[in-house]
Amino acid sequence: MEEVMGVINLSNDRDQLNELTFHRSSASVPFGGRYRLIDFTLSNMVNSGIRDVSVFISNKYRSLMDHLGTGAEWDLDRKRGGLFILPPSFEHTSSPFKGDLQHFQDHIDFFYRGQQKYVILTGGNLVANMDFRPAFEYHQVSGADITVIYKKLDPDLDDDQSYRKMEIDEHRRIITIENESNRLKSNKSSLEIYIIEKQLLLDMIHTNTENGKYDFLQHCIIDNLHQLKIFGFEHKGYAVKIDSIESYYRHNLKLLSESHWHNLFSEPGPIYTKTKDEPPAKYLDGAEVSNSIVANGCLIEGKVENSILFRGVKVHKGAIIKNSIIMQKSEIGENTIIENVILDKEVFISPERKLIGTKDKPLVLGKKSMI
């Protein structure tokens, strides 16, 4: 897919993950014991043969830039092409955000410099293992102006409030996409992945921004459903959106199920991430771990059950952790009980404490909190 450039659009990034996005963008939120959310989309692009990828970032991007670096972990540290990180232009950082089309217009030279004919545009909060090549082949064969990748909602896996539903006719043409004033009952939901010819995208960027229209979804997709051939392509594999604390908690812990882990990580390609050298986890006397993911560098003296521990977590003697997500370098004091809790990085919990949330509303503590 050398004729395709990848665009990861974080321009519309919102603080939907509450405490977890106080100091970072949602795309850089840790996931699954060792990854960041953006790793999945970036890996999917690389595994599909895309070698030019731009990330349009909006705010709180220090953590994301540190994670992505030169793009070496994704084989994107190249003399030609590779990874491009595109922040808002200086003149727009202090003014109200208009929309992603303005962000694209500010970096329009990136699109012109690229030699590719097509663009795959996606967000950064989709957890999926996906090969874009079948969708791209369909886009070319069907004669579509724009192809939208979608999935059929699984009631056992998906919260339908997280997805933008669509109606598609028998020819796969999209006839309706829901918005705030038009809710649908369809089980077909957009994954917000778009395949489009670059020249058409450029034309829409110029036309819309000149007329004071700045929202890609509304002004390029929804407003053109009857003017352009906008078709849907179904993705039948694992794919979930992380857009709330509840979905973050639920889909992390689902990885403790072997079938869910297999569905996400077994195929079609590996998920790459920034690596850090740490010794293996160390289990001392009194350690008891069941059905959990424990990353390197952890020190375990207590009990861990149905939980995910990121790199360098310390669980002291007598502590009990159940159904919880503990991020990097956090420390749990002796005889502390933690259940249905999300701890961000470097949280310190004193001995003899009790923190208990619910499965529907997990308790969340922000980065470097001390209890």
Image (cartoon, helix red, strand yellow):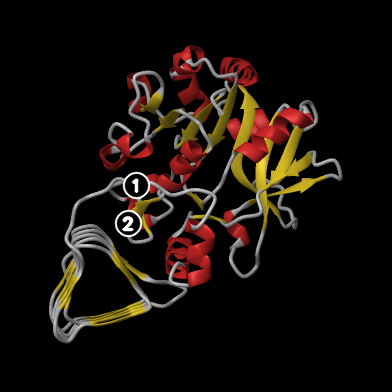
Q: Are marks 2 and 1 in contact (CB under 8 Å)?
A: yes
Question: In the image, which disc is placed on residue 34?
Answer: 2
Among the 4 quarters of the image, the one containing residue 170: top right
User: Percent from the top left, x then y, of residue 68?
Assistant: 32, 38
- Amino acid carrying label 1: it is Thr
Among the 4 quarters of the image, the one containing residue 62: top left
Residue bearing mark 1: 273
User: Percent from the top left, x then y, of residue 100?
Assistant: 50, 30
Residue at x 39% of width, y 18% of height: 80
Horizontal side of residue 160 vs 11, given as left or right = right
Determine whether 332 is above or below 319 in the image.
above
Determine whether 352 is above or below 206 in the image.
below
- Amino acid carrying label 2: it is Arg
Q: CA distance from mark 2 to mark 1?
A: 8 Å
SS class, disc 1: loop
Instruction: Tell me if mark 2 has few (under 14), some (14-19) or many (20+) residues whose alpha carbon lies within 10 angstroms of its own.
Output: many
Q: Is tag 2's residue or tag 1's residue first in the polypeptide sequence?
A: 2
Question: In the image, which disc is placed on residue 284?
Answer: none
Q: Looking at the image, can residue 192 be seen? A: yes
The quadrant of the rendering that contains the C terminus is bottom left
Residue at x 66% of width, y 47% of height: 150
Residue at x 60% of width, y 23% of height: 118
Horizontal side of residue 176 vs 321, given as left or right = right
